[in-house]
Amino acid sequence: MELLLVVLITVLYASGIFMLLRRSMVRLIMGIVLIGNGANLLIFLLGGITPGSPPVIPESRSVFVEAYADPVPQALILTAIVISFGIQSFAIVLLRQVYRLLESDDLDDLNTPLEEDI
Amino acid sequence: MIQNLIILPVLIHLITGTVNLFFWGKPQPQRLVSLLGTIVAMVCAWWLFRQVRAEGVLVMHAANWKAPFGITFVADTFSSALILFTSFAGFAVSLFSLAGISNLRAKHAFYPIFHFLLMGLNGAFLTGDLFNLYVFFEVIIMASFVLITLGGTKAQMEGGTKYVTLNLLASVIFLTAIAIVYGLTGTLNLADLARTLPNIKNQSLINITALLFFTGFGIKSAVFPLYFWLPSSYHTPPSAVAAIFAGLLTKVGIYAMLRMFTLLFHPDMFMTTIILVISLGTMITGALGALIKNDLKRLFSYLIICHIGYMVGGLALFTQAALGGAVFYLFHDMMIKTNLFLIAGVIRKIRGTTNMPKLGGLYHHYPKFSLLVAIVIFSLAGTPPLSGFWPKIYLFQAGFANTSWASNYYVAGLIFSSLVTLFVLAKMWKEVFWKKQPDTQIHVPDHFEPLSFMRKLSLILPIAFLASITLYIGLDAERILTVANDIAKEMLNPQPYIKAVLGK
């Protein structure tokens, strides 16, 4: 499981950075999404994976007796997912507006020379 | 009870922003509520600062979950002082927005977002938890995304895209670093981390994490190879927005850097050299960029970058004098940079442009305003009795005391960029104020003159307010220096902070 996640995270980060470095705006969005998910999985992996034992104390006991899954990383990921969801939707709308104004998907077209007084 | 009140600076802006949402589409009540909110925030920040000075570090445990398990908010001298200066800048910009932000913008949620931005800033200063810092950073960038693109002109969209992309990248890098830190220690509380991090066996991984943090905060605070988003976006939004960005957003990156690298990580020789070289690069490129720009707002953007270098270098030298100087410079810079963009806004109102070759004759037409600007410019250039001078002395002193090759270059860079700043400001003064108004511009209408007295006042008063704070910082430097030195002492000896949070 850990090894699989490591490979997955590597692929997500690498492809995310590759996409970010493209000139197309759609790929830029894809890159942001991929790299964000990579970071979320990284928190999950580094929080330590304990399969099959949820952090719930059984009724018959008053304390934990065996190793349990750490709930903190899951809370962190949940927060991070919500945040990145909001930000990604903002970025998508922004780039759509940019596309409308420029009629181009190329990031190199973003350098319209400044009309002298903006 | 008093401990729970330290969250007030965050709450006030949350409430003000929310109340503003209820006045959707009605600019006038929003303006009043916003002004009221910033005044209350200022009073609160002053109270908090006095309280922290009197009683030491104040800690709030959310819902009384004791650290390191719950979320903690910590107000020490550094954070409370920054909240105080943030509230000054917030008040000035809110006042300026009365006439500086059009009704159309105000109808589209300018005020709520402005207050959420201030809430995020105060939260980032107050939080004692690494992940909470991330969340507040996200609040800040989310609000700033909206503010920078609100209006939807082509230039704003282009600048906004660069700004959004690089800030998102910075957040991901920051999040990655948090993941590694959590994996290594199992805690996110800053005070707890300060205790556990030195005991981790795998110190090289910690150094790499420190570099990740440095990169993340570096993008946000616009240090040398990562600053390109700043000059290509800060000149696009209206001046009130640019002012709050210039004064506060890059500075929160510097705050986070100072906090991380004094509390959690302690820069070793390698790290020190890297940071010094980066700060040198920041100063030089910022200064050279400012030299060639003809547009006021772009020129000021490069000056922001240039002066970020001073503070980052102060962190690298890591002595009490250097940290004290960096903190003092931070206070001074927050006030000055906010003010510069407000001034650019007024100039644009008067002449309809911020392009320097087209400006001129302002001294002839507006002598009192020019005098006000002169105070700000002299303070920024660091003329002796004014505020830019004192922190530089400390930074020079610390630079000379350190004998490594990098610090020699740092001092040289400091001298060079100070001179260039002086030159650039002199050039700007000549072009904008003393030069005769070019013939082509004589018939461009003046939008400032016909304004009613109250509107004029709301544009000029914030500039005068910030300039008087700058004057105070310069003329009563003794008191500010005491505060800055106390902060430097707290940074070099974080034990009281840790003890206050963990309670043992």
Image (tube, grey):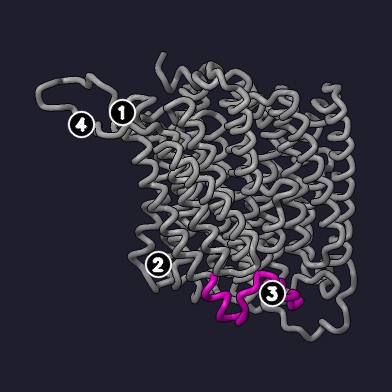
The kind of residue on which mark 1 rests is Trp
Q: Amino acid at mark 2?
A: Pro
Q: Are marks 2 and 1 in contact (CB under 8 Å)?
A: no
Q: Residues within 10 Å of mark 1 (few under 14, many from 20)?
A: few
Q: Which sits earlier in the primary sequence, circle 3 or circle 4?
A: 4
Lower sequence index among marks 2 and 1: 2
Is B479 part of what is drawn in magenta? no
Residue highlighted by disc 3: A109
Structural crowding at the residue carrying mark 4, measured as other residues with C-alpha within 10 Å and reported as few (<14), some (14–19) or many (≥20): few
Point 84% across, 47% down: residue? B284
Residue annotated with mark 2? B29
| Chain for disc number 2 | B
Q: Are marks 3 and 2 on the same chain?
A: no
Q: Callout 2: helix, strand or loop? A: helix
Q: Which residue is mark 1?
A: B65
Mark 1 vs 3: CB contact within 8 A: no
